[in-house]
Image: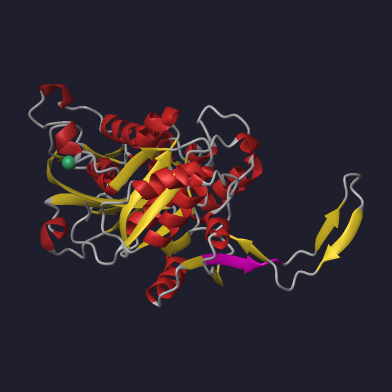
């Protein structure tokens, strides 16, 4: 029994069909095909789980599809609210099973929805809920037919043009006063009236007035393979790009020496950078920036300074490791930008070589690699030539999750 949810609208999502018209697929019947990286049924259920007025949600499946359903809902939050039942030989019988499963839940109304209409939207549900709340016993979302309708004979010759003024294309969720539609279903079953293709027809047959509300043009039923391919394109086209930016900052102390390595380039100088590895502050900052884009910690997590094997190591090893991690997580590195803050040596003459080094290490085009430098106007530790600092930014685009 559902507790503590406002409203008392139960939902039956019918997903027991075999979907022969969509052709065979390794993914199973069409309600389990992936669109936008997720099974059709999971998009449909997500909408009802998120809608605040929905109470218990029954999913009616084919007895062979239990594993497919479990996999399809595995990542849905609140999936424990779903009640799974198996369907019957016809859609009508499947709906009846779904209605029975709601019997002890104290609901007033029920929405009966096709599992293969994943683009149902909350405003449509609200339009229906308003009519139900106003006391309508049966509410049908539908759109006026816009094509001219012809009747043709067995030879494919048109015999009439059907006036379309009063014609509507029926959608789901078809929605009802629960006890009323349950009684109509029971009576139809008793009387062996078993050839209804939707629930509004059962209501009509039972003499219940069915009220039309405006459907949604997006609320299409995925029927053939082409529908599924188009739905997939639509979702992928509208998906938010997964662009992530990471930053990194590092400082190393200067001490007397013969030169510094920055961005993998050795620059002769009367000082050197102190550090465990080659102390390439620029590559350290960029390594942190890259790791940040996939939540992989920082350079110290991967290369502890206590580990002797990194003593004097060229820092490109760290950067290569981070790039490999990012790519392994599905990321494409879009750009890398490093700002060096150093009073001396002069960076300008080496900038191009540094960019080329970055491009080589990261396997990026040169225009995606940037190195900039500034002095610290002789103030602070950098200004006093006590150390060199670096700030880095990396942008990585990740593939949508499948
Ligand atoms: Mg460092």
* Residue most extreme to the front: 191
- Specify the segment rendered in magenta: 140-145
Indicate yes or no whether the magenta region holds residue 144.
yes
Rendered residue at 25%/45% (across/down): 80
Visible residue check, residue 352: no
Quarter of the figure with the C terminus: top left
Rendered residue at 31%/46% (across/down): 82
Where is residue 346? Give x, y as percent.
30, 51
Where is residue 302? Give x, y as percent.
18, 32
Relative to 316, residue 104 above or below: below
Across the whole image, how many numbered discs are drawn on residues? Answer: 0
Where is residue 186? Give x, y as percent.
44, 50
* Residue most extreme to the top: 309
Relative depth, front residue between 282 and 383: 282
Relative to 71, residue 203 above or below: below
Relative to 190, residue 341 above or below: below
């Amino acid at each position: 029994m559902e507790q503590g949810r406002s409203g008392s609208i139960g939902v039956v999502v019918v997903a027991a069909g075999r979907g022969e018209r969509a052709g065979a697929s390794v993914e199973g019947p069409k309600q389990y095909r992936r669109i936008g990286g997720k099974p059709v049924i999971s998009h449909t259920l997500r909408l009802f789980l998120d809608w605040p007025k929905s109470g218990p949600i029954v999913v009616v499946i084919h007895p062979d599809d239990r594993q497919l359903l479990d996999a399809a809902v595995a990542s849905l939050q609140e999936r424990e609210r779903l009640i799974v039942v198996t369907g019957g030989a016809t859609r009508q019988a499947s709906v009846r099973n779904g209605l029975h499963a709601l019997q002890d839940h104290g609901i007033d109304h029920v929405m009966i929805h096709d599992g293969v209409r994943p683009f149902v939207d909350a405003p449509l549900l609200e339009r229906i809920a308003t009519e139900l709340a106003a006391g309508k016993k049966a509410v049908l979302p539908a759109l006026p037919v816009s094509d001219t309708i012809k009747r043709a004979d067995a030879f494919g010759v048109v015999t009439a043009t059907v006036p379309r003024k009063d014609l509507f294309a029926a959608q789901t969720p078809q929605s009802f006063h629960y006890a009323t539609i349950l009684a109509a279903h029971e009576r139809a079953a008793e009387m062996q009236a078993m050839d209804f293709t939707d629930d509004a027809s059962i209501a009509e047959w039972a003499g219940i007035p069915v009220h039309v509300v405006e459907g949604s043009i997006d609320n299409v039923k995925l029927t053939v393979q082409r529908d599924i391919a188009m739905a997939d394109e639509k979702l992928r086209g509208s998906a938010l790009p997964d662009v992530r930016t990471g930053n990194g900052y590092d400082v190393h102390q200067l001490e007397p020496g013969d030169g510094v390595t920055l961005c993998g380039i050795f620059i002769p100088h009367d000082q050197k950078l102190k550090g465990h590895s080659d102390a390439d502050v620029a590559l350290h900052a960029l390594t942190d920036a890259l790791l940040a884009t996939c939540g992989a910690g920082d350079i110290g997590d991967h290369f502890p300074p206590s580990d002797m094997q990194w003593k004097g190591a060229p820092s490109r090893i760290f950067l290569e490791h981070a790039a490999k991690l990012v790519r392994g997580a599905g990321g494409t590195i879009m750009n890398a930008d490093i700002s060096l803050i150093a009073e001396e040596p002069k960076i300008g003459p080496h900038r191009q070589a540094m960019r080329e080094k970055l491009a080589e290490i990261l396997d990026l085009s040169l225009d995606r690699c940037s190195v900039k430098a500034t002095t610290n106007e002789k103030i602070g530790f950098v200004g006093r030539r006590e150390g060199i600092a670096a700030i880095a930014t990396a942008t990585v685009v990740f593939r949508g999750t499948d």
